[in-house]
Amino acid sequence: MPQKHAHSHGEPPYPAVLYKKRGDSMSFATFYQRSVDDPSAFWAEQARRIDWHHPFSQVLDGSRPPFARWFVDGATNLCHNAVDRWVATRGEQAALIAVSTETNTEKTYSFRELHAEVNRTAAIMQALGVGRGDRVLIYMPMIAEAVFAMLACARIGAIHSVVFGGFASNSLASRIDDATPKLVVSADAGSRAGKILPYKGLLDEAIKLARHKPAHVLMVDRGLAAMATVAGRDVDYAEQRRLHMDAKVPAVWLESNEASYILYTSGTTGKPKGVQRDVGGYAVALATSMDTIFCSKPGGTFFCTSDIGWVVGHSYIVYGPLIAGMATVLYEGLPIRPDGGVWWSIVEKYKVTRMFSAPTAIRVLKKQPPELMKKYDLSSLQALYLAGEPLDETTSSWISSALGVPIVDNYWQTESGWPIMTIARNVEDKPSKLGSPGVPMYGYKVRLLNEASGELCGANEKGVVVIEWPLPPGCMQTIYGDDQRCIDTYWATQVPGSPNPAYSTFDWGIRDDDGYYFILGRTDDVINVAGHRLGTREIEESISSHPNVSEVAVVGIEDKLKGQVAVAFVIPKAAVDTAQGRAALEAEIMGTVDRQIGSVGRPARVYVVGLLPKTRSGKLLRRSIQAICEGRDPGDLTTIEDPSSLQQVKDALLA
Ligand code: AMP
């Protein structure tokens, strides 16, 4: 029988810690092997890194593949581990550093202050009727209150669903309908390059469009935009905060497998998938990654430039650094405003020890005058981590010599929650290879499958990157509310010779003779614009709603700065013959996407064609269109309905 003991630090039944302590030398191969040969022993050791209110009785329940339940019966809480745990020992240390170059404000919250704010927000949520298991949708700019709201949800066992602020009404409405939140937390506005983005207006429109109506909307008024309030539904955050100044809301101890959050991501259909994550497995995976991969030390400062609306923001702006006892920087603004030195000024001022960004941002900074970087003392910085899209060699070499610290590429996805491949520098400082994110991380049984034959690929042979069941702790539990969709979408393949199903990442990969992997792009219709994952189908659906669009194909094409950009080819209902008419239609379509999905989804160009390349069964040949746009061979066209459609695409590009 598991005995009750509060805040255990690894007393029995946990085995002794076997992971590397400083000074020990353990090869990564040994560390990795243990994780796949005996996952229960391996993860029980890692579980000692966090506080458990109640010990788990079973490390892995694998009775229902492809699902996996980690740390069964264990009771813990993400907010406790991120905040409360540090208040006694690091109460006055910086925890959250909120910097906005949009509003020119900076504020540092110590762990004690963060604890107080989170308690207040949790009390407000409870007063609005939010409890364990209820969903709270967070549609917020990068401000401290967004982090308070996420942690407050974690504290009371509510499931948060953060929607990226760049999404507009239709995207938001479909997420409201899927998550059916009791409460939405939002703000009057966001700001980008000084331009006000009226969040409240977009939210009101989304709630109008949605079938589900949230009972309350908690609004942070930043004084950036006028906003209409709906009586009885909308509640002012500042007013509520005053009422709950001294609130103490105990962390609710959750069973490890209860849901902590839902994060929507794009796939092959127009309907976004709600990736659902657990509590205990996620906390353990993050704590382990913070040490082994991010070499974190309590008291250090982590600066992740992503957005809380993406998985990188969830794991490495909010939960990861705080669970590791580090200060985390929350940055609202562009990397080049007021000038291209702004991030380096933050590194200097807050003595940032570890930074995490995306290749696109580094390509943007590469265009800046070099003296902007030299102006600042960057001696605190020990490593830069890059993820979200392939890291090209030019960018990697440039930033590596400019900063003089290790550049650590890491490959993962919304579904995994933490790196699938990288170099775990704190286990073994293996050399990295240009263009490769590294080797599979502990717990991930990564395989490459030949797309046509389903056989395992040999070295230097391109295949689909799959992961053999079970996925390690921290990975997606399911698609929210739809186990079957999760099974059908992700678990349709099997590794030859294995009795277990395999999870598909939908990425192409290749492994060299030394076991290093290279990621070669998506196998599906997902595109990656500046590290942001977008579904071409969602964009197509939005474009189709334009009254003069009969058919549309959206593809991602290579872009020097953003990695990829979306371009659309449309067949209009009524002929558009003039250049002027085409330009007008392009502008209208861009406006439609802006309004419905948001500017993140806006295609860079809209081309008018009379015919689209399709197979005889009517399937759009997106890969062929993409190849033509990129000046490559369109590939096998034996099944094409009408080859003249290819010429139409070529002509449109030249028109
Ligand atoms: P997201 O779910 O938005 O994080 O997007 C995940 C996708 O981004 C992956 O499936 C890859 O296609 C791509 N990706 C992420 N990190 C890397 C990386 N380090 N190298 C290459 N591609 C990456």
Image (cartoon, rainbow, N blue to C red):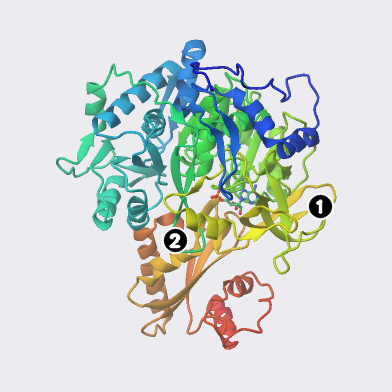
Residue identifier under label 1: 512
Query: For this view, does 507 lie left or right of residue 101?
Result: right
> In the rendered image, is residue 525 in sight?
yes
Q: Which mark is residue 68?
A: none
Q: How far from the left and from the top, in percent, is residue 128?
A: 24, 33
Given residues 213 and 489, the one toward you in this image is 489
Q: How far from the left and from the top, in percent, is residue 395?
A: 68, 47
Which of the marked residues, 2 or 1, is nearer the chain's N terminus? 1
Mark 2 vs mark 1, CA separation in Å? 37 Å
Residue at 39% across, 46% down: 165
Residue at 77% across, 41% down: 432
Residue 431's quadrant in the figure?
A: top right
* Amino acid type at image mark 2: Arg
Nearest to viewer (mark 2 / mark 1): 1
Q: How far from the left and from the top, in percent, is residue 635?
A: 68, 76
Given residues 434 and 59, the one toward you in this image is 59
* Badge 1: residue crowd in 10 Å (few <14, some 14–19, many ≥20): few
**In the rendered image, the vertical position of residue 394 relative to residue 339, given as above or below:** below
Residue identifier under label 2: 602
* Secondary element at image label 2: loop
Query: For this view, does 449 lie left or right of residue 247?
Result: right
Given residues 361 and 7, the one toward you in this image is 7
* Secondary element at image label 1: loop
Q: How far from the left and from the top, in percent, is residue 296?
A: 63, 25
Given residues 5 and 417, the one toward you in this image is 5
Query: For this view, does 420 lie left or right of residue 254?
Result: right
* Amino acid type at image mark 1: Asp
